Image: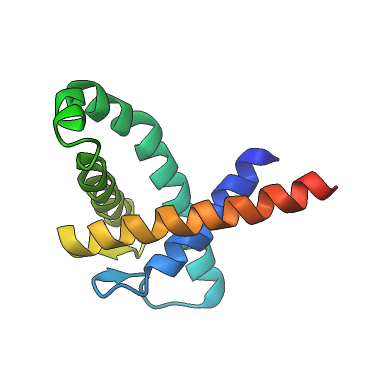
Amino acid sequence: MGFLVQVLLTAVAVWVSTIIPGIDLGDGSTPAKVGTLLGVALLFGLVNAVVKPVVKFFGCVFYIVTLGLIGLVVNGLMFWLTGWMAERLGLPFQVTGFWPAFWGAIIVALTSWVLNLVYDRIADND
């Protein structure tokens, strides 16, 4: 159940990121957009689970030298990679460049954080 909730929360966060110019969900019906968001959320989770640890391992010196600020760039690149992979998989999700990806990744991270806080509060009350 936790995995499904996490995917749904990430999908909402990705949807919020579409307010950034350069991040486009494409045209289509509401169910098609929901399906796209769920697919992108799964893909984003997969990219962060597989690619990001490898980048962190090989770039650990950059994390130390920049006091972790390179993490913002890495998150942006991971979001950009997710957009590129989504297009290749036929999902109508597009990230047009680094700066939209950079700001979109920040919005996804902040939105996910807030949504997880709310979800944890609700789950603790049950």
Determine if residue 60 is in view. yes
Left or right of 32 in this view: 46: left
Toward the viewer: 101 or 24? 101
Left or right of 94 in this view: 19: right
Looking at this view, name the residue that lies furthest to the right: 126
Q: How many marks?
A: 0
Choose top left, top right, bottom left or bottom right for residue 68. Answer: top left
Task: Give the quadrant of the N terminus.
Answer: top right
Looking at this view, name the residue that lies furthest to the top: 57
Choose top left, top right, bottom left or bottom right for residue 36. Answer: bottom left
126 w.r.t. 50: above or below: below
**At 75% from the left edge and 53% from the top edge, which residue is drawn?**
122
Q: Position of residue 72 (x, y in %)?
A: 25, 47
Determine if residue 90 is in view. no
Q: Position of residue 73 (x, y in %)?
A: 20, 47
Q: Position of residue 99 (x, y in %)?
A: 18, 62
**At 21% from the left edge and 24% from the top edge, which residue is drawn?**
60
Q: Position of residue 126 (x, y in %)?
A: 85, 47
Left or right of 85 in this view: 41: right
28 w.r.t. 81: above or below: below
Choose top left, top right, bottom left or bottom right for residue 83. Answer: bottom left
**At 23% from the left edge and 71% from the top edge, which residue is drawn?**
22
Coloration of the structure image: rainbow
**At 46% from the left edge and 51% from the top edge, which residue is drawn?**
41
Toward the viewer: 60 or 64? 64
Toward the viewer: 103 or 7? 103
56 w.r.t. 105: above or below: above
